[in-house]
Each structure stands twice: as C-alpha cells, then as structure tokens.
C-alpha cells in the first residue's frame, strides 16, 4: 500500500535532482515518486535513467 504519491516536475535540473530525491527518499513512509521531465536539454532525463532505479514499481519517469 502506498501512503504518499509525490509528483516532481523537472526541467534542466541535472545539478539539483539528486539532492531533491535524496530528501524525498528520507521520508519514512511508503511512497510512489513520479518524475515528469519536460525534455530538458541539460541531461536531467539521462541522469535519471543512469543513476536511479525505476524498476521497483513505485517510481515512474515521464
């Protein structure tokens, strides 16, 4: 059961997204994280695909 759904909109946030997600992950409740990238051109989507696992079913990248 998911207790919290979090929507994070990103655009050219490659330098800050790691810190944001770290803070979100520190919240000690069941959660689903949905990240929406508006096709930024500074590598945010590529960073997220390389560094984060979205395979656990509770996270999504759009």
Image (cartoon, grey):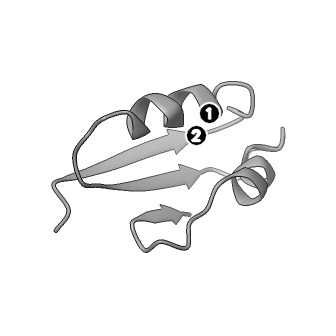
- For the point 39% across and 66% down, the residue is 58
Mark 1 vs 2, N-terminal side:
2
Which mark, by number, is residue 36?
none
Q: Quadrant of the C terminus?
A: bottom right
Q: Identify the secondary structure beneath mark 1.
A: helix
Q: Which residue is mark 1?
A: 17
Residue in front for this viewpoint, 6 or 37: 6
Q: Residues within 10 Å of mark 1 (few under 14, many from 20)?
A: some
Q: Identify the secondary structure beneath mark 2.
A: strand
- For the point 74% across and 44% down, the residue is 44
Residue in front for this viewpoint, 24 or 11: 24
In the picture, measured across the screen, residue 40 lies left or right of residue 59, that is right
Residue in front for this viewpoint, 38 or 24: 24
Q: Which residue is mark 2?
A: 10
In the picture, measured across the screen, residue 30 lies left or right of residue 38, that is left
- Residue 28, picture quadrant: top left
Residue in front for this viewpoint, 41 or 21: 21
Query: Pointer 1 and pointer 2: residues touching (CB < 8 Å)?
Result: yes
In the picture, measured across the screen, residue 27 lies left or right of residue 55, that is left
- Residue 30, picture quadrant: bottom left
């Amino acid at each position: 059961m998911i207790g919290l759904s979090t929507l994070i909109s990103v655009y050219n946030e490659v330098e800050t997204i790691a810190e944001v997600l770290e803070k979100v992950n520190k919240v000690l409740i069941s959660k689903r994280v949905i990240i929406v990238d508006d096709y930024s051109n500074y590598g945010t989507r590529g960073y997220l695909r390389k560094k984060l696992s979205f395979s656990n079913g509770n996270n999504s990248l759009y």
